[in-house]
Image (cartoon, rainbow, N blue to C red):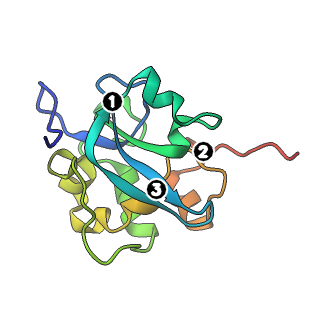
């Protein structure tokens, strides 16, 4: 079952938060803190308390990638027609895979619809919440909006 657009035929944001309406987990973060990669799930999983608990003791967005209906004008990354986050990722980050990943949300993904293969070749390095941002990732993420620095111990 490929996850498709919502009832309003809106595209999915592949950088959604789990608390967003109709959110699904579509990948698990693997790799290292310095070089995270995604392992795509065979089927997107609805967000449940049980799914979120699997991430403990860290936040679910450090372990899972979520997709939900694109918030469009309600999102600070949306310029009225395009997702600037997807654009910055394509322009500022290197590719990290040689072939398209086996993504179950691709056909309805805003990043795919807007940037095509270029977004998919960079997507596996994106983690919604991380504390090990490279300078390239900081610039792509727009740190004034999303980057959270871990307090020095």
Cα–Cα gap, marks 3 and 2: 17 Å
Q: Residue at x 56, y 67 (%)?
A: 35
Would residue 99 appear left or right of 15 to someone viewing this image? Answer: left
The residue pinned by badge 1 equals: 23
Camera-side residue: 56 or 132? 56
The residue pinned by badge 2 equals: 144
Q: Which badge, 3 or 2, is on the more N-terminal residue? A: 3
Q: Is residue 62 above or below residue 21?
A: below
Cα–Cα gap, marks 3 and 1: 17 Å
Label 1 neighbour load within 10 Å: few <14, some 14-19, many 20+:
many
Would residue 37 appear left or right of 59 to someone viewing this image? Answer: left
Residue 35 visible here: yes
Question: Marks 3 and 1: CB-CB under 8 Å?
Answer: no
Q: Is residue 9 above or below residue 34?
A: above
Extreme residue in the right direction:
153
Which numbered circle lies on residue 52?
Answer: none
């Amino acid at each position: 079952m490929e996850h498709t657009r919502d009832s309003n035929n809106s595209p999915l944001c592949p950088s959604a938060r789990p608390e967003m309406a109709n959110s699904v987990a579509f990948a698990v973060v693997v790799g290292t803190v310095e070089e995270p990669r995604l392992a795509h799930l065979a089927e997107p999983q609805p967000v449940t308390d049980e799914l979120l608990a699997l991430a403990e003791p860290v936040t679910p967005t450090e372990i899972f990638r979520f997709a939900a209906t694109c918030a469009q004008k309600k999102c600070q990354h949306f310029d009225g027609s395009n997702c600037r986050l997807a654009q910055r990722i394509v322009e500022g980050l290197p590719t990290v895979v040689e072939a398209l990943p086996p993504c179950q949300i691709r056909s309805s993904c805003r990043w795919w619809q807007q940037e095509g293969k270029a977004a998919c070749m960079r997507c596996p390095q994106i983690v919604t919440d991380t504390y090990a941002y490279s300078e390239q990732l900081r610039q792509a993420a727009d740190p004034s909006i999303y980057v959270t620095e871990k307090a020095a111990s």
